[in-house]
Image (cartoon, helix red, strand yellow):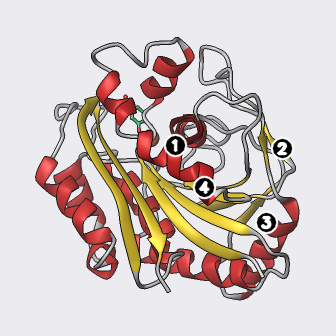
């Protein structure tokens, strides 16, 4: 049977991708950011997931105001990097896992989570920057990836609780897949940031640190954070953190926090990162 071995949470700041692609990782501004990912880069070599279910949000690259799926499941064999205005990132094409994705679609939809099935989709920095942070700059990505895109761009985004329960449904789906696969779930986005309006640049370190502290042992508490609280406390883009709750919901009740990293700022954003291992 397939099993979920652990999870990774990470911000997905686009400028991190640009720093990597342009050889700037050792510059004083970026060096401490990339240092925070050294643990994950080593750990992933032993953990060796066959498939990563990568929860992220599309930033008006594949979708737009014309089409706003709340939860979209990438079922294609391949996902090209999106052109976000300055050409696609020079990263490998993302290989999907159509069989497992179709199985997840069937399982979660019959479980009453009506995801949108997507058979053609370009993937933007929300998905490729986390892959780059953890895997560096390989010729091919070392795992297959099932993108799960969550709408956190256009109101109304799903609640944290809905995201957490979707994670549980994804876990049930994975655990009923007959092939022996090592699966990991990643939650991306956040932490606090606001890219627009009078509060642009807002960062709330106490809020972020509380979130980092609680998501391992007490995720249910975080599922009760309402949209207005995210908006007030973590800025207009802080709502991206609900995607970490999909990841957390897909893990066991007990997890071990293998690595915790927090750094301010990268671009306009507080960078948070956790490596969680399933216990039991
Ligand atoms: C920034 C951060 C994001 O998460 C994002 O999607 C876009 C921009 C930023 O810090 O600039
Ligand atoms: Fe984002």
Residue 51 appears at what percent x and percent y?
72, 59
Are discs 3 and 2 less than 8 Å apart at CB? no
Spatial separation of the CA atoms under disc 1 and disc 2: 24 Å
As drawn, the label of residue 280 is none
Spatial separation of the CA atoms under disc 4 and disc 2: 25 Å
SS at mark 2 in the image: strand
Residue named by callout 4: 46
Of 143 and 39, nearer the camera is 39
Residue named by callout 2: 78
Residue named by callout 3: 101
Q: Examine the rendering and report whether any part of residue 216 can be seen.
A: yes
Of 67 and 264, nearer the camera is 264
SS at mark 1 in the image: helix
Point out the frontmost of discs 1 and 4. Answer: 4
Q: Earlier in the sequence, mark 3 or mark 2?
A: 2
Q: Earlier in the sequence, mark 1 or mark 4?
A: 1
Point out the frontmost of discs 4 and 2. Answer: 4
Q: Identify the image quadrant of the N terminus.
A: bottom right
């Amino acid at each position: 049977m397939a099993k979920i071995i652990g999870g990774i949470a990470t911000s997905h700041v686009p400028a991190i991708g640009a720093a990597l692609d342009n050889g700037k990782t050792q510059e004083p501004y970026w060096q401490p950011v990339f240092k925070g990912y050294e643990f994950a880069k080593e750990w992933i070599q032993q953990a060796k997931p066959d498939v990563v279910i990568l929860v992220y949000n599309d930033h008006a690259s594949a979708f737009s105001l014309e089409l706003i799926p709340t939860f979209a499941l990438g079922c294609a064999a391949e996902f090209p990097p999106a052109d976000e205005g300055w050409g696609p990132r020079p990263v490998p094409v993302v290989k999907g896992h159509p069989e497992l994705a179709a199985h997840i679609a069937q399982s979660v939809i019959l479980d009453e989570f009506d995801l949108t099935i997507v058979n053609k989709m370009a993937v933007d920095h929300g998905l490729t920057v986390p892959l780059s942070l953890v895997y560096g700059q390989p010729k091919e990505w070392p795992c297959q990836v099932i993108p799960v895109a969550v709408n956190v761009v256009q109101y109304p985004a799903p609640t944290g609780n809905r995201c957490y329960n979707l994670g549980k449904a994804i876990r049930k789906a994975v655990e009923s897949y007959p092939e022996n696969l090592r699966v990991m779930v990643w939650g991306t986005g956040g932490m606090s940031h606001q890219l627009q309006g009078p509060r642009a640049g807002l960062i709330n370190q106490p809020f972020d640190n509380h979130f980092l502290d609680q998501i391992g042992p007490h995720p249910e508490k975080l599922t009760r954070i309402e949209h207005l609280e995210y908006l007030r406390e973590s800025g207009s883009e802080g709502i991206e953190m609900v995607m970490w709750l999909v990841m957390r919901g897909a893990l066991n009740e007990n997890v071990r926090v293998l690595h915790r990293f927090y750094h301010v700022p990268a671009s306009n954003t507080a960078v948070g990162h956790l490596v969680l291992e399933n216990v039991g």
